[in-house]
Amino acid sequence: MGKRYFGTDGIRGRVGEYPITAEFMLKLGWAVGRVLQTKGFNKIVIGKDTRISGYMFESALEAGLSAAGVNIALLGPMPTPGIAYLTRTLHACAGIVVSASHNPYYDNGIKFFSRDGQKLPDNIEEQIEHLLEQPLTTVEPDVLGKAERIVDAAGRYIEFCKSTVPASTSLSNLKIVVDCAHGATYHVAPSVLGEMGATVIPIGVSPDGLNINLDCGSTKPATLRETVKAQGADLGIAFDGDGDRVIMVDHQGEVLDGDELMFIIARDRLRTGSRFDAVVGTLMTNLGLEIALRALGLDLYRAKVGDRYVMERLLSEKLILGGENSGHIICLDRTSTGDGIISALQILAAMLQSGKSLHELKAGMTKYPQILINVSVTGKVDLQRAPILEAVRGVESDLGDHGRVLLRPSGTEPVIRVMVEGREAGVVERHARDLANVVRDTLSV
């Protein structure tokens, strides 16, 4: 059964355009409440990021859940992984996140966590979609859901974050710039680091409902780089709008993406005695990480692009570490979902234990040049046509064991993503450009 509304990361779109409307969210809250409430679990938590439309959608979801007879715990602005954590600890039957992650303020979305703090399985999403087509009915007045606000939500999550590194971990000798993207981590991340002793220089911590992710955060680290160098900081940390992604900047202003951060965490886990034989990445994970992991005696398993698929592979292989180069890192030995703050703390703990700077820690991995070109397409796409296959084989033959080629349709745009990776930037760029031209010419015939 196909899904009409749910994508790989919940439901997302432009505010005011169906289904991202107050009317739909009312019905969605009701459907979710009907499907997910169970005997002994009759409470759903709602948290949101800082975009202005969050007020509207929070209220609409609350009304729908109440109509279904479900109690509601309102968390207010909270990082997505914090909502997952509180879903578990408050013994709720589900958690709802009102956020469009790294998108601009005019977008918003809804994603869900099950009561164990993980994404909802496909069959549950399908049940919710089925109910969305049914008339909304309201329970009897004496069993309507009640709402309460959890006033200490941020404090609970802050303590949990700190508990994921050894209690002896002190950041008192570190000066850290923290870019919170004017998003959900603005009141949490600086507190976590400050309570652990760091000298914190916060930026992107003045949300006004419209400036979330605006020229800041993990997708736009230029200001973070400049601030780290200007302040003589030891490093910088940037989150996206909902706090499940992180990238870091070393004292020289060089950016470390998710692949480099995963390498540092994996190596440190081995040092501390964790037993695992592989890390989960995606089809876009840099070849340099695969080679660096191999030197540590670890394999790299590649899942489809999307943290949902990384999580599925982690669970099926019983592994503890995976993620994407975007900075969405999942440390299953610490928490149940991707968490920017917790991932950053693992890096800081590795720095302190090794006595090395962030710049020194990343030296064990060399990223390969990677070029990605989007080729616009219309209609049905067949990437198995002879000219395309021949061109791909030619590039793969030239790159040998020191490069990769990937062609894949985008899941969100009418484009084919052409990726080429190899040791020499000039060669990679030439192959990517030529291959993109072959794809464009072949698909236009």
Image (cartoon, grey):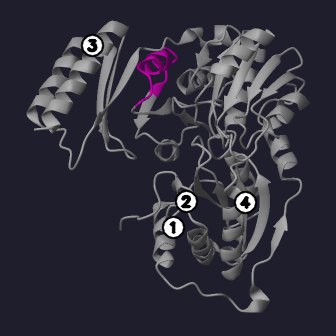
Q: For marks 4 and 3, give the CA distance.
A: 49 Å
Q: Three-letter amino acid code at disc 1?
A: Ile
Q: Do tag 2 and tag 1 residues touch (Cβ < 8 Å)?
A: yes
Q: Do tag 4 and tag 1 residues touch (Cβ < 8 Å)?
A: no
Question: Would residue 364 be found to the left or right of residue 287 on screen?
Answer: right
The quarter holding residue 358 reads top right
Location of mark 4 (residue)? 55
Boundaries of the magenta span: 284-299
Residue 291 belongs to magenta span: yes
Location of mark 3 (residue)? 430
Which mark is in front, 4 or 1?
A: 4
Q: Nearer the viewer, residue 140 or 289?
A: 140
Q: Position of residue 442 (x, y in %)?
A: 13, 34
Q: Position of residue 58 (x, y in %)?
A: 70, 63
Residue occupying image coordinates x 60% and y 23%: 261
Q: Establish if 93 lies above or below 223.
A: below
Which mark is in front, 2 or 3?
A: 3
Question: Would residue 28 be found to the left or right of residue 400 on screen?
Answer: right
Residue 415 seen anywhere in this rendered image of the structure: yes
Task: For label 1, count other residues whose C-alpha is less than 10 Å away and answer few (under 14), some (14-19) or many (20+).
Answer: some
Mark 4 vs 3, N-terminal side: 4
Residue occupying image coordinates x 81% and y 29%: 166
Location of mark 2 (residue)? 120
Mark 2 vs 4, N-terminal side: 4
Q: Three-letter amino acid code at disc 4?
A: Tyr
Residue 354 seen anywhere in this rendered image of the structure: no
Q: Three-letter amino acid code at disc 3?
A: Arg
Q: For marks 4 and 1, give the CA distance.
A: 26 Å
Which mark is in front, 4 or 3?
A: 4
Location of mark 1 (residue)? 124
- SS under mark 1: helix
